Image: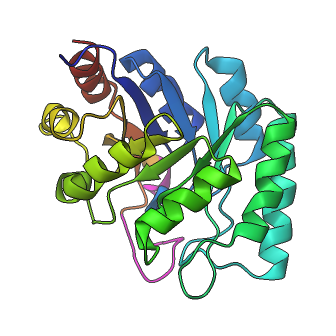
């Protein structure tokens, strides 16, 4: 039976979160900069998301793309952003901090855990877990730290590829910590992932391209770096796909 599967949707904006909620999401993960895999959203976004939504909002705490070993300044920013997110109503925070060798930076991570625990909010370790050298050692460390949930693709590029490890992680975790499969779960494979892993929750993203023609007067002008996507396009969560996956989850 697929009934009762909890659906979390990865969102890059408050509009995304609204669409995800309308499609049947049980919870949203609020980010910015999805091109980089999700960075810390603005506090204005956190405030508005809590104003607009009736479902939990988990806030990403990630100061930059390109790895998970942060400078002293970046770490201080993470602490500030965690406090601000919690003060502005976040239902939880999602983060990941590693050492240069890819192992979990327990000392730094614990400072963020303490802030979230003091606020009584969810604590999630994101897919930085997927590049740790020993997933079972990392699993036990995160349990000992009091992390509530691990977002993981099973240390592969996508969840369907990571199913063997995900099954082991879910079994070893038991009731001690939640394992949230995420990464590459789509409408066409959601039911397969749920059946094969035995998971009780999944994390998905599903976007459609939207058009904003306010740049049409000077189409040669670009605002990015070396990659030049069309300046009149942006992504928005596809409510219809979220609804389809929600129907799969709810049975």
Quadrant that contains the C terminus? top left
At a point 77% along the width and 39% down the height, the residue shown is 44
Residue 135 against residue 194 in the figure, above or below: below
Report if residue 247 is visible in the image: yes
Describe residue 81's horizontal placement relative to residue 167 as left or right. right
User: Is residue 228 rendered magenta in the image?
Assistant: yes
Looking at this view, is 94 or 43 the one in front?
A: 94
Residue 251 against residue 73 in the figure, above or below: above
Q: Check the image and tell me how it is coloured.
A: rainbow
Looking at this view, is 135 or 44 the one in front?
A: 135
Which residue is farthest bottom?
101
Report if residue 38 is visible in the image: no
Residue 125 against residue 212 in the figure, above or below: below
Residue 29 at x, y = what percent? 54, 39
Describe residue 77's horizontal placement relative to residue 165 as left or right. right
Residue 46 against residue 131 in the figure, above or below: above
Looking at this view, is 223 or 16 the one in front?
A: 16
Describe residue 190's horizontal placement relative to residue 204 as left or right. left
| Image quadrant assignment for residue 109 | bottom right
Q: Which residues are magenta?
A: 214-229
Quadrant that contains the N terminus? top left
Chief SS of the magenta region: loop
User: Is residue 100 rendered magenta in the image?
Assistant: no
Residue 145 at x, y = what percent? 69, 54
| Image quadrant assignment for residue 134 | bottom left
At a point 84% along the width and 34% down the height, the residue shown is 119
At a point 79% along the width and 42% down the height, the residue shown is 116
At a point 22% along the width and 33% down the height, the residue shown is 194
Count of all numbered marks drawn on residues in the image: 0
Residue 182 at x, y = what percent? 36, 47
């Amino acid at each position: 039976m697929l009934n009762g599967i909890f659906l979390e949707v990865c969102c890059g904006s408050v509009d995304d979160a609204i669409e995800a909620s309308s499609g049947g999401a049980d919870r949203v993960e609020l980010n910015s900069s999805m091109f980089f895999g999700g960075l810390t959203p603005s506090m204005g976004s956190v405030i508005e998301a809590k104003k607009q939504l009736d479902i939990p909002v988990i806030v990403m705490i990630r100061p930059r793309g390109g790895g998970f070993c942060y400078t002293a300044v970046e770490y201080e920013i993470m602490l500030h952003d965690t406090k601000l997110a919690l003060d502005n109503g976040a239902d939880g925070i999602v983060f990941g901090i590693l050492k240069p060798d890819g192992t979990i930076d327990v000392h730094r991570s614990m400072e963020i855990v303490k802030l979230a625990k003091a606020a009584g909010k969810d604590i999630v370790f994101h897919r930085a877990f997927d590049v740790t050298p020993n997933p079972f050692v990392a699993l036990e460390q995160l349990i000992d730290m009091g992390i509530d949930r691990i977002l993981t693709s099973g240390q592969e590029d996508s969840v369907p590829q990571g199913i063997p490890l995900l099954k082991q992680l879910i079994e070893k975790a038991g009731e001690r910590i939640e394992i949230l499969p995420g990464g590459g779960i789509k409408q066409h494979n959601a039911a397969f992932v749920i059946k094969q892993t035995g998971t009780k929750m999944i994390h998905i993203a599903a976007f459609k391209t939207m058009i904003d023609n306010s740049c049409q007067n000077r189409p040669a002008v670009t605002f990015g770096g070396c990659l030049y996507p069309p300046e009149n396009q942006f992504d928005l969560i596809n409510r219809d796909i979220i609804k389809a996956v929600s129907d799969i989850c709810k049975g």
